[in-house]
Structures are given as C-alpha cells and as structure tokens.
Image: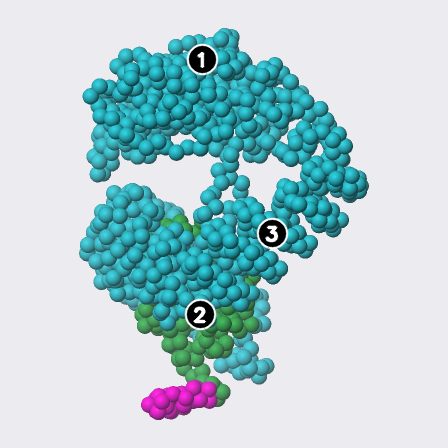
Chain colours: A cyan, B green
C-alpha cells in the first residue's frame, strides 16, 4: 500500500509530499478498515500516521469524528505489530483532549504496562497517565509505584516523568510515591537518576529542609548524569539565594567544584550559576570567568554563544573581571555567527578602554543590519551604557544611533534607540541640539504612536530652551497636519509650550493653534481651545499651572478614585482633591540594563509607594470604608537592626482614621510568633478602634499587623498623642534546624512606645490647624481656610491648602518616662515644593552609663534645599534636653540635619537594644506639611 | 528581567519542530501551552525562525526571547527551542540526539522525502526523546533501540539507490565495500 502510494506520488513530481493533499474526511473514511478482520497492520499504520500528521499540522477534528476514529483505533490493540501498537499510544496521547471517553483504553494500557513486552511498557505508562484523572489515578497507583522502581530504565523513567506531569493535577497522590522515587534516584541509569531527582525536587520544593537534606545526600554521593548535575546546581543556587547563604557555604563549594566536571554542560551550568549569584566578588567570579574564557575558543557555536552571553552578563556588573578575556573576545568579533559577534562586541564595549570605542563601533556598524532585533537592542543598550561612561564620545554614538534609527526595525528596537538618545540628551547638554535634530527627523517618518508622542513631549520640554526654538515648530506642526489623533494632540501640547516660553514665537503659535481648533478630533480641538485661551491671557502663573505642569495626581490613584466614584453614585461632582498626589515613582535603576532577553520589557508604569500601600490596605476587610488613603508616612524603624524583633512603623492617614502598620520581623530562628498584635494605649482623646493581628511570624519572614485609630473629631485641640505600644504575641519555641514548632506556646510581650505628637512652635503653623485643614481639604471647596501663610511661589489665583500628616519619631531610652516634644517638621516651610516633604524622623537616644561609645559614620543624605530649621532646631533642643552623654540620631528624608547634631551618634544603640529587658520608648512626631494646589477658574476647559 | 535564575525544573524544551526548505512544517511539538497557544502564532513563529536561520548554518540563535538551536540536513531543518535562560548545551544535546537517531533510522538519508516516507518512525523518535517538555532520553543509541523501527524493507527506488551509491562512493574504499554489500543485500531481498 505504501509503495503504491509512493509510486503514484513520484509520478506527480519528485520531492512532493505524500501527505500534501490529505483530506481529513477521506482519511477518516479510510479509518474504517480498522474494523476489518484480519487486521492489516501496514495499512492501518499508514492511516494512523496520516491522522497524527493531520493533527500535527493543526487540522481541527470535531469531537464526534475524533471519538469515532478513536473507538475504531481501539480495535487495533488486537494486533501484535509493534510499530502499530506504538502508534496507537501516540494517537491516544494526541486525541486525549479531543475525543470523548478516552478512558476506555485504560485496561488495555494497564495490561501493556504490566506485561512482558518491555518495549510496550514505557510508552504505555506515558499514554495511560495522559488520559488518567485524579480519581482514576488511585486505581493505577499500585502499578505506578511498581513501575517507578522497575529495573528496566525506560519503564522507570517513563513512570517518573509521567508522575511529574501529574504533580500539577494530583499532588497528594503523587506525594505518596516519594519513597519509590528516592529508590529510583540511586539507579545506575543516568536518565532515571535525572528524572527521579526532578520529581523529588518538585515534591519537596516547599520544604526547604528536605531540599537541603536531599542536596547534601546527592552532592556527597555523586551522580553520573550530567543532566542531574545541572539540576542539582540549579537547586543549590536557588537555595543559596533564598537562605542568603554566604559564599563560604558548602553549597557554593559544590557549585564551584562542578567547574571541574568533565561534562561541558555541567561546567557551563556551574559557571552561569556563579555569575548569576548576587553579590559575587571578583575573586569568586574568577574561576567561572576562566572556564568561560576557554569555551570562547570552542569549535561548537552553541558553546561559544553560551560563553560570550554569560561573559556579557558579567561585564555589566564586573567589567574588570572580564578584561582578562578581551583577547578571546576580539577573536569572536569576526565570528560567522552574528549573534556571537554582537555579544562579543558589546562585551568589549563594556570592558574596553575609551580608545577602542571607535574601532569597535566601526566594526559593529558593518554588520548591524544582519543581526536580529533582539541583538540590536543589546547593541543599543551597550551604547547607552558607554555614553554614561565616556560622555566625550557622544558625537560618535549619536551618529551611530541616528543611522540605526533610519534602519528598519521593530518597535522594541526603535524604542531602545529613542530612549538611549533621550538619556544622552539629558546627561549631556552639548549633545542636546544634535539629538533633538535626529529625533525630529525620526518623527517625520515614524509609525509608532507611542514614540512619536514621547518625542513630541520631549520637544515641548527641551525645545523652547534651545537657542533657536523656531526650527522645531515646523516639525511639530507637520505632525498636526499628517498624523493620527493621539500624535496630533501631543503636538498641540508641545506647540503650547513653545508659545508659553518664547514671547516672540507666541503670535505664530497662536495662529497655528487657531488652525488646530478646526481639527476633526475632539481631543485635539479641546486642547487647542484650552491652550489658546490660556496663552491669550499672557500670564506667567497661568502658563506655569496649565501648560508646564500637567496632571499632578497619581494616575493609579485617579483610576481608583474614579472607579470608586462610579460605584457609589452621588449627587456631588467628582472631586479631584481626593486623589492622592503623585509621589516619586519607583523607577528602575538605569544602570541595570536589561540583558539579552529584552523582548518583554515591563510596560506597566510602576505604581508609587503610596499606591502600593493603598492596594494593600484595601485588601484588608477591616479597613473597608475608610475612604481614600490621604498620605502614608515613610517607614520608621522602631528598633535597631539587631534586636530580636525588628519592628518598623508606617502611618497611613485617612480622613478620620489613622492606620498604623507595623512591619515586624522575627530574627530568632528558634521561635515562631503567632497572633502578633501591637497593642496601643493612647494618652489623649484618640481611641484605638481595631487591631488586625499578624497570624504567624516565622523566622526572618516579615509580617504586618495593623492598628486602626480614630482621630478625635470633636476635639480639635487633641492633635498630639502618645501611644504606649506593646507588642503581644504567642511564642512557640521551635527547632532552629527543622523549623518544627513545639505544641505549646506561651504569651509574651515586648514594649515599644510610639506617639504621634506635635507641639506648636513659632515657625510652624499650629498643629491644630493642620489637622483641621487636613480634614477640611476633603470637604471644602477650593480656597478654603488655612492656606494663608504657606503658599509656594508658584501659587495661582486660588490656592488650596493641603496638609499631610507625616511621621517622625524620636526615641529615648531610659528607665523611666522621658518624653521629648519636638517641633514639627518644617516641611511645609516657605520653600514648599509640589511633592510632600518626606517625613523627618528624629531620634534621640540616651546611652546608659557604662556602655561604650562607638563612632559610627554619618549616613550620607541629601539635604533638601528648603530650610528645615524648625525640625532641626527642635531636635537639637530635644537632644540638649537630656544628659550630656545623650546620643541623638536624626534621620530625615525630608528633614535636614542640624549642624549641632552632627557627631552625636547612636553608637551603642544596636548593642543596647539587642539586650532583652530594656524598654524603649519611641516618640513620634506628627509632622505636618502643607502643600497648595491651584484650582482653576477656567474649570470648564480642564482636561483630566 | 532575564537575569532571574531559572526555577529548577525538568521542563527544558519549549518546542521542537522540523521544517522543510520552504519553511513548511513537517512536524512540530509545542510543550509549553502558554507559548504560542494558537496554530496561527505557531506558524508565524516558525516562519520567523526559518527566515532568520535558513541562510546561515549558525547552530544557535536568539529570537522572540527564546534560545533556538538548529541544524540542517540537505533539505530539512531541525529546531529545538528553550527559554532564554536555558542551558544551551542541554538544548544542543536534545538536537544532536534527535538528529543522530533519525539519521540511524533513516539510514543516513536525512532528507525530506525519506523523512516523510517514514513519518511514523519520526513521530516515535520524537516521542522517545521528549515527553511533555522533559528530556526523556539523550542517547541516540537508546532511542533507536526503544523505537525499534526499521525504515521500510525495500524503500530504495532506483533513484535513491543511485543516490545511495554516489554518497558512498565519495567516501573511502572501505565504505565503498560496505555500500556494495548493502546494495547486494537490498537486491537480494
């Protein structure tokens, strides 16, 4: 039959595909011969092959027809032809999800897997497990256990791999086979070893102790399989990372010993594991780098690629460690595999000296068009890093980048180039004009809306400040004429910025605006109308407010507020003031340039810290209905780093409540804390409404508990309050090695004291007014009271006062009650900027007699420009209020440092506080800050 | 970011496929269901990979965030795909095993026509090498033994016999001897 088939095909032309013109219906028709007796194995085999081929080509089989074919196929189990039987197993696997009632072959498969024919057993197990569900699994459990420890390697391997597939589905059943897997792991066959190790790890990966034991066993006994070694290295490096084990740990030694393994695969895996370890020193890297260097001259392309790719990664963090390989890398520049050549050049760019840059750039530009987008991105990133290192080379780079920009390429590639040019412009003012010119040229023919809008925004920001801003107008207005809506709108905004900053251009810009007002798109028209009106006022303040400074609220916060608003329909219009202001966004470090896999860059805007908190708090049912989060303080450490329990506090202020979030970490490995609550006893009119305990606090895993405090609304003078805080918990001793806790525990407590307090001082606004205005800010219309004294320079016609409760603290250690009252942070001082000043935490610390003074270097902090005399002065006063031997430490993100406090450090704090029995009192300040918000009188045209 | 270490796992291979010299799929297996779930995405991925790799025999490439090792023989291309962080040498071991096993089963005629004529054997070989993304066997000898498949008793048409002979002639005289024996054997059959 096959022969006939072939002949016919050859006539129709050589090299044609015997499966080319297969019709699904015809094949299914043919499948009827499965029912003939006696079975013709060759014909049936050919038809099965056709069916599998069709499935493989993506042909869709309907349930009915698939079921029909499947049932016909089951008859073929009567034949004893080996290949036919094997093809039946394949058909079962392929059809497992398409056909119905596949479980009818269970008994046939069970028979095969326990039968005498070893050739059938392995494949039968794999087919059987493919069609088995959790309930059926119980029935074959016995056979599986036997199969795992079977002496035939193929049977054992099949059973182990199938078990691994089933872990996802029925973990509990497979977990019972651990002993069998353990036995299989000592098999002589290398693949069985590997599969057993894989299964054992998957079953135990949540139990760190068991994994450690397993690692110890296998690293000592030694395995034969290189695959198993690779697996062991991965497990070991993951464990090292989790336990933050030092590099003197036996695990590290094991990985390092694998560098001397006879299999290249294992050596490479070990080298790569070492390179990827965080905090590796150059000395530890050296052996890994030297084996990679050897690989660089391997005749195998894959090995050279692997080596140079890994070296490229090393070069990002430790360029000096790779310098030794420079000669080998030079040889790879001309490698016929362009991926290898690109990686070699980008590595050299990182490690080489400034003089070699020109030569390398020339080399790479000779074949940049041949390499894939992924590697072009790598090249761009290398250039970007280079520009930071050698700013003088920017003209070479800029030329190269602009050439690349002209080439064809996908979005990721273009975006990388644009980002790189922008970062060069930002860092190097000399290159600004050339850079902007290249970007202008790029947007003339740019298919990516995102990039065009980004560049337009940049032009609007930078263009007006260049010596000849008029030349950019043409490029921008061309966009208005030629592009899509989003780009047009961005172009209008950019134009407005030119008009606002350059008086001589203003008339022309107004004319262009006039034209934009006739645009077909709403958004473009609206923007043009709005900017037109603002520009015509010719008021600097208005320009500043509406043209230069866009939306100042945090976007995720706005989204949340709007969502909330739509959920609770109300008569009141939506109030922008309830939306939290955008705080500094957590951005990734620019130096951490993405290595090779850049195809999936994080698209999402990183939410600000406050948005993250808001998200977390909203997830706690007890805190539903508190309203929007107004402000979260910076975390304040309540304990020194080396105490048995590390506690830090974050204050979240809501309109009528405050939530104290205590992030606690248990640093004792022989204790398990449960039901952890920080009990707060307020001194004033405040009342604690609710505690949310942290259910369990195992060793070194941080947990959070919360206390909800009502702000007194009837007593506006109650603005300061001292809370004496006690951390209460149930201690259960546990074995430091196993982590198994004892059955019984005992209650214990740990005293801390915290106080949000405030003191009216001359330089700052009375606290009462701050608190009042903080709640007023939500309800009062624009221009409410309280904004009288602290307007920033940029204040508009109407100002809205916003205040925030900050957090600050001061701690004094003494046997008795020592309280210091510290003036509020002057964060709301005259030079108040748009963002809230960080909270200043002032900690004064008194040393008990007899303790040694250890000097500790001052933490270096950026001192903000705004005078913070109030805070510093008050802190100084507080510090002076104590004994001469007092140690005061002041920490402030927003607060400055008083010169008088310099040198007064808290050396013994760590020592002292590590001792149990000392009571610490923590005093916290309620720092308030004020910010003004301008609100519009032309509210009809405000665009969100 | 890809610098994050790999979760230790046996699931090494994301996909494996064999294409002809027009980039058409002869066989394809995708083991990671999250990766290119639809046929259309798979085809376009294969097309992209083929376009980037068929001109130069470079053994390894990095495309769409994936490491791809490949090998060609006459008019077919073999590809093994793994994640960006995967040990390239492991993927290479799979590719070599696949190629060597097929080469034994097809009696060194690793070309499109022969492959298609013995498609059942090819399916079985792939099934023995990889199971759901896990490397099941990496030794070609073992694979061939397990599959226990012989290319058709008498698949040698005149054309392929001639091809067979020319191939063998190019080799040393000892190989020539064996080639003659083979032909004799095949004619006797």
User: How far across and how far down the image is residue A777, in percent?
Assistant: 58, 19
Marks 1 and 3 share the same chain: yes
Please indicate, yes or no, whether residue B17 appears anywhere in the rendered image. no
For label 2, count other residues whose C-alpha is less than 10 Å away and answer few (under 14), some (14-19) or many (20+).
some
Question: Residue shown at 47%/23% (left/top)?
Answer: A868
Q: CA distance from mark 2 to mark 3?
A: 33 Å
Q: Label 3: chain?
A: A
Q: CA distance from mark 1 to mark 3?
A: 53 Å
Q: Secondary structure at mark 3?
A: helix
Residue at mark 1: A759
Q: For residue B179: magenta?
A: yes
- Residue A313: which quarter of the image? bottom left
Kindly indicate whether the residues beneath marks 2 and 1 are on one polypeptide chain: yes
Q: Nearer the viewer, residue A824 or A883?
A: A883
Query: Disc 1 is attached to a residue of which chain?
Result: A
Secondary-structure class at tag 2: loop
Both marks 2 and 3 on one chain: yes
Q: Which residue bears the numbered disc 3?
A: A435
Where does label 2 land, which residue? Answer: A335
**CB-based contact (under 8 Å), mark 2 and mark 1:** no
Question: Contact, CB < 8 Å: mark 2 with mark 3?
Answer: no
Residue A348 appears in view: yes
User: Magenta stretch: residue A865 in it?
Assistant: no
What secondary structure characterizes most of the magenta part? helix
Residue in the picture at 71% in, 24% down: A937
Regarding mark 1 in the picture, which secondary structure is present there?
A: loop
Give me the residue at 37% from left, 20% from top. Answer: A810
Q: Give the extent of the magenta segment.
A: B162-189
| B23 lies left or right of A941 | left
Mark 3 Cα within 10 Å, few/some/many (few <14, many 20+)? many
């Amino acid at each position: 039959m096959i022969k006939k088939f072939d002949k016919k095909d050859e006539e129709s032309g050589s090299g044609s595909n015997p499966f080319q013109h297969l019709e699904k219906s015809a094949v299914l028709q043919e499948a009827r011969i499965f029912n003939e007796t006696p079975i013709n194995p060759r014909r049936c085999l050919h038809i099965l092959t056709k069916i599998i081929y069709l499935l493989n080509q993506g042909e869709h089989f309907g349930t009915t027809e698939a079921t029909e074919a499947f049932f016909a196929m089951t008859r073929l189990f009567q034949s004893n032809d080996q290949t036919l039987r094997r093809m039946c197993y394949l058909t079962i696997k392929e059809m497992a999800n398409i056909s119905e009632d596949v479980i009818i072959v269970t008994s046939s498969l069970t028979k095969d897997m326990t039968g005498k024919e070893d050739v059938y057993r392995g494949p039968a197990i794999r087919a059987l497990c493919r069609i088995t569900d959790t309930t059926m699994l119980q029935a074959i459990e016995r056979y599986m256990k036997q199969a795992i420890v079977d002496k035939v390697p193929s049977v054992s391997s099949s059973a182990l791999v199938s078990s691994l597939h089933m872990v996802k589905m029925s973990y509990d059943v497979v977990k019972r086979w651990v002993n069998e897997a353990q036995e299989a792991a000592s098999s002589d066959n290398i693949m069985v070893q590997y599969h057993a190790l894989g299964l054992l790890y998957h079953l135990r990966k949540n139990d760190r102790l068991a994994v450690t034991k397993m690692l110890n066993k296998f690293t000592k006994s030694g395995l034969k399989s290189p695959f198993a070694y690779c697996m062991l290295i991965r497990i070991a490096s993951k464990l090292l990372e989790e336990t933050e084990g030092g590099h003197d740990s036996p695990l590290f030694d094991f990985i390092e010993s694998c560098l001397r393994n006879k299999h290249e695969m294992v050596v490479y895996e070990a080298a790569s594991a070492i390179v990827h370890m965080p905090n590796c020193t150059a000395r530890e890297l050296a052996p890994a780098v030297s084996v990679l260097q050897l690989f660089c001259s391997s005749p195998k392309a894959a090995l050279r690629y692997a080596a140079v790719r890994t070296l490229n990664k090393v070069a990002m963090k430790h360029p000096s460690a790779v310098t030794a390989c420079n000669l080998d890398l030079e040889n790879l520049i001309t490698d016929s595999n362009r991926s290898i050549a690109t990686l070699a050049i980008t590595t050299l760019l990182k490690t080489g000296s400034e003089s070699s840059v020109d030569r390398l750039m020339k080399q790479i530009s000779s074949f940049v068009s041949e390499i894939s987008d992924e590697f072009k991105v790598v090249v761009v990133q290398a250039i970007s890093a280079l520009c930071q290192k050698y700013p003088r080379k920017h003209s070479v780079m800029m030329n190269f980048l602009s050439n690349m920009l002209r080439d064809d390429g996908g979005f990721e590639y273009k975006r990388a180039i644009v980002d790189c040019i922008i970062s060069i412009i930002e860092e190097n003012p000399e290159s600004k004009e050339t850079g902007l010119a290249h970007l202008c040229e790029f947007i003339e023919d740019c298919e990516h809306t995102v990039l065009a809008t980004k560049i337009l925004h940049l032009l609007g920001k930078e263009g007006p400040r260049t010596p000849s801003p008029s030349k950019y107008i043409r490029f921008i207005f061309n966009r208005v004429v030629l592009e899509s809506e989003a780009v047009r709108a961005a172009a209008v905004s950019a134009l407005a910025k030119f008009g606002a900053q350059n008086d001589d251009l203003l008339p022309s810009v107004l004319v262009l605006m006039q034209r934009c007002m006739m645009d077909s798109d709403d958004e473009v028209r609206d923007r043009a109308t709005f900017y037109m009106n603002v520009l015509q006022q010719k008021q600097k303040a208005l320009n500043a407010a509406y043209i230069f400074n866009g939306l100042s609220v945090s976007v995720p916060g706005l989204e949340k507020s709007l969502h909330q608003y739509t959920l609770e329909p109300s008569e009141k219009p939506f109030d922008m003031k309830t939306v939290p202001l955008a705080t500094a966004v957590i951005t990734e470090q620019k130096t951490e340039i993405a290595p090779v896999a850049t195809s999936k860059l994080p698209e999402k805007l990183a939410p600000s810290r406050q948005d993250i908190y808001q998200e977390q708090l909203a997830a706690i049912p007890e805190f539903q209905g508190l309203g929007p989060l107004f402000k979260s303080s910076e975390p304040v450490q309540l304990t020194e780093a080396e105490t048995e329990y590390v506690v830090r506090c974050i204050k979240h202020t809501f309109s009528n409540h405050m939530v104290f979030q205590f992030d606690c970490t248990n640093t004792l490995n022989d204790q398990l804390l449960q039901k952890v609550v920080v009990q707060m006893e307020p001194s004033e009119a405040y009342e604690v409404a609710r505690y949310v305990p942290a259910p369990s606090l195992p060793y070194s895993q941080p947990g959070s508990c919360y206390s909800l405090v009502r702000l007194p609304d009837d007593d506006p003078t109650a603005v300061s309050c001292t809370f004496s805080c006690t951390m209460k918990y149930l201690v259960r001793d546990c074995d430091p090695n196993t982590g198994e806790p004892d059955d019984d525990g005992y209650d214990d407590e740990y005293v801390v004291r915290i106080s949000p307090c405030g003191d009216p001082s001359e330089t700052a606004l009375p606290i009462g007014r701050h608190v009042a205005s903080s709640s007023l800010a939500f309800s009062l219309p624009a221009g409410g009271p309280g904004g009288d004294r602290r307007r920033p320079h940029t204040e508009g016609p109407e100002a809205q006062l916003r205040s925030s409760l900050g957090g600050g603290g001061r701690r004094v250690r003494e046997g008795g009650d020592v309280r210091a009252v510290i003036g509020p942070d002057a964060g709301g001082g005259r030079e108040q900027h748009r963002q809230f000043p960080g909270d200043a935490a002032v900690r004064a610390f008194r040393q008990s007699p007899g303790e040694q003074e250890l000097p500790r270097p001052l933490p270096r902090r950026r001192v903000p420009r705004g005078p913070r005399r109030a805070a510093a002065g008050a802190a100084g006063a507080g510090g002076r209020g104590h004994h001469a031997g007092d140690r005061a430490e002041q920490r402030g993100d927003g607060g400055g440092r008083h010169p008088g406090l310099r040198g007064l450090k808290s050396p013994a704090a760590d020592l002292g506080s590590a001792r149990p029995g000392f009571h610490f009192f923590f005093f916290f300040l309620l720092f308030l800050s004020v910010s003004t918000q301008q609100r519009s009188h032309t509210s009809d045209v405000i665009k969100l | 970011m890809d610098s994050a270490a790999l979760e230790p796992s046996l699931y090494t291979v994301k996909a494996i496929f064999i294409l002809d010299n027009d980039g058409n799929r002869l066989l394809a297996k995708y083991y990671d269901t999250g990766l290119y779930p639809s046929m259309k995405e798979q085809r376009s991925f294969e097309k992209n990979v083929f376009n980037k790799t068929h001109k130069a025999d470079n053994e390894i490439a990095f495309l769409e965030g994936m490491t791809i090792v490949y090998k060609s023989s006459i008019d077919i291309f073999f590809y093994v795909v793994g994640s960006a962080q995967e040990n390239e040498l492991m993927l290479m071991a799979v590719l070599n095993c696949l190629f060597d096993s097929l080469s034994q089963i097809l009696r060194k005629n690793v070309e499109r026509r022969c492959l298609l004529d013995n498609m059942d054997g090819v399916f079985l070989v792939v099934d023995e090498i990889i199971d759901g993304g896990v490397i099941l066997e990496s030794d070609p000898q073992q694979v061939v033994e397990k599959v226990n498949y012989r290319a058709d008793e008498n698949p040698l048409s005149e054309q392929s016999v001639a091809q067979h002979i020319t191939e063998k002639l190019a080799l040393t005289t000892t190989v020539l001897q064996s080639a003659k024996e083979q032909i004799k054997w095949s004619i006797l059959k």
